[in-house]
Amino acid sequence: MQCYVYLDEAHSIGCLGKTGRGACEYTGVDPADVDIMMGTFTKSFGAMGGYIASSPELCQYLRSHSASAVYGNSMSPVVVQQTLRAFEVLVGDDGTTTGADKLAAIRNNANYFRLKCMQMGYVLALALHACKPKEERRKNKRHSPPCCIALCSCCFIWAAWRCMASSTLPSFLS
């Protein structure tokens, strides 16, 4: 039996890691150790489309067999340029610190969110934080990526909404 490591970077590319390169950079995992990586350009890059990064054989198979590749359109040149420009800004190739400033703001907001949730009594999972070395986890207990809270009761959802709506906590419920 063969297993593959699949990483969905849809919510981490552009916001996790020192330079925004996603979960691999954040956790220190070599991207070459991931068999299939995918992500979107709709969130951090304000564009449309996405990517699959894998072996040439798998990418060719997807190009010839997936409905979106066979029946859909390619990304328009304008959208491709917008995505490339967003990458340039993110890594600082535009000569500014805008990308680094945005990444710092995301980290600060995530840490603030985590702190406020903990102060309100929520028990939060440390997801990607748990992938870091034990010494680093001890040192940075309150530093982690944005987190999700699973609320399993309508009463809890209503109470969480009221608490979050009445605070300065950057949050959303869906």
Image (spheres, rainbow, N blue to C red):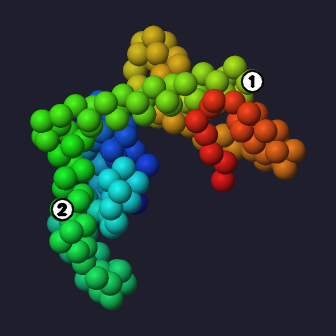
Give the image quarter of residue 96: top left
Q: Quadrant of the N terminus?
A: bottom left
Q: Secondary structure at mark 2?
A: helix
Which amino acid is tagged 2?
A: Gln
Q: Is residue 6 above or below residue 122?
A: below
Q: Which label belongs to residue 81?
A: 2
Nearer-N-terminus badge (2/1): 2
Q: Nearer the viewer, mark 2 or mark 1?
A: 2
Q: Is residue 163 left or right of residue 138?
A: right
58 shown above or below 12: below
Q: Which residue is mark 1?
A: 121
Q: Are marks 2 and 1 in contact (CB under 8 Å)?
A: no
Q: Is residue 54 left or right of residue 44?
A: left
Is disc 2 surrounded by few (<14), some (14 to 19) or many (20+) residues within 10 Å? Answer: few
Amino acid marked by disc 1 = Gly
The spot of residue 34 in percent (x, y) is 30, 49
Residue 153 vs residue 93: left or right?
A: right
Residue at 49 percent across and 12 percent down: it is 138
113 w.r.t. 94: above or below: above
Q: Residue at x 58, y 36 (%)?
A: 170
- From the top left corner, tell me how far across and down residue 52 is, in percent: 29, 62
